[in-house]
Every structure is written in C-alpha cells, then in structure tokens.
Image (cartoon, helix red, strand yellow):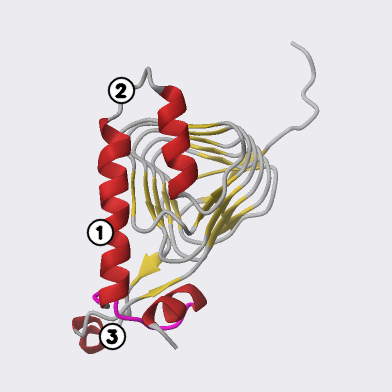
Amino acid sequence: MTEQEKMLTGALYFPSDKTLTAMRKQCRIQLDELNSICQSEHNKRTRLLKQLFGSTGKRLYIESSFKCDYGENIHVGENFFANFNCVILDAAKVTIGDNCMIAPQVGIYTATHPIDPKQRATGIEFAKPITIGHNCWIGGMAVINPGVTLGDNVVVASGAVVTKSFGSNVVIGGNPAKVIKSVDLNPKPD
C-alpha cells in the first residue's frame, strides 16, 4: 500500500513520502496563483478552484488567502463560499454540502498525529475525513477537527472548537463545542 493510499484510508502514513511531498508542492504552486489573482477576475479564480478541488458545484467563491494540502480531496456543493484565510488540511476527504458559508479564519483539519510521543517523533501521522452537510454556516475562527460530521442546517458559532460530530438543525459553540440550541426551520413571523 502506498503512503497516499494509507493516508486516504485512515492508516498511519509518512507525509514526508516523495509522492505526497510532490503533490503538496504542486498544490502550493496552484494556491500561489489562485491567491495572486485579482478579486475582479472571478471567472479565472473559479476555473482554478475547479481544477484544484476533487469536485465542485457550478457556483463557488473563496476569498484570498486560501490554503490546503492537496486540493483534490476537497469536495464542495453548489453555492459554496469561504471568506478570508480559510485553511483546509485535506489529507483525508473533506465533503461540504450545498449552500454552505465559511467565515474568516476557519480551520478544517483532517490530519492528526499519534498521542504517543515516540510514535509522533517518527513523523508519522494519520487523517480522518470530515463531512459538513447542506446549508451550514461555520463562524469565524472556528476549528473543525478530524473525523467530524456535521448534519444539515448546522450553525457553528465563532471560535468554536468542534471535536465530535453533531446531527442536523443545531447551533453549536464553545470549546469543546456543544449544542446551544436547535435551529427552527419554521420560524414564526415577527
């Protein structure tokens, strides 16, 4: 099994592997180009994102400066928006549904390291996929950790650290994140 195959299946792998290092380097080159394009050149930015990501909906927009490890492991739905300084460490698959918005300085991290210090010192790591449902809003400076799944219509409060999965129709916040309240899908008019 190659290091890339290990990475994508959640097994321990060495990110220093030549193939993985070359893939990250190529991604950085694409990101440098993307992040240098003037905001008014929306079509060019969109075209580059569609080349970088594993799959996208027709409409997406990401502000500069955007960072990721590989790009090809990121899959976003229709009407995706990410604000300034979004970081997605996509050593495992990241799936984001339709109509999702990400506020500034959000981190979505699939990569993690062993807790055992001797194992960690070898440079080995592993990754767990992240799934974010449809119609989600991730507040500024929130962190989504490896292995998390968020259902549909989830709002993540600013600064939240999401360490576990949550179902649909909830507002979560805090460190670690917990349910603050339910999302009312049938609000009464004021």
Where is residue 47 shown, x and y percent of the image?
46, 36
Q: Which residue is mark 3?
A: 116
Q: Which residues are magenta?
A: 10-16
Q: Mark number for residue 25?
A: 1
Q: Residue at 41% across / 65% down in the picture?
A: 91
Distance between the alpha carbons at the discs numbered 1 and 3:
29 Å
Residue at figure coordinates x 46%, y 26% from the top left: 43
What residue sits right under mark 2 in the picture?
Answer: 38
Q: In the image, what residue occupies the spot 30% across and 22% down?
A: 38
Say which amino acid is labelled 1.
Answer: Lys
Q: Is residue 127 above or below residue 36?
A: below
Task: Say if the magenta span includes residue 116.
Answer: no
SS for callout 3: loop
Question: Looking at the image, which is closer to me, 154 or 70?
Answer: 70
Q: Quick check: marks 1 and 3 in contact, CB under 8 Å?
A: no
| Distance (Cα) linking label 2 and label 3 | 45 Å
Q: Position of residue 89 (x, y in %)?
A: 37, 57
- Residue type, label 2: Cys
What is the crowding at mark 1: few (fewer than 14 residues within 10 Å), some, or many (at least 20)? some
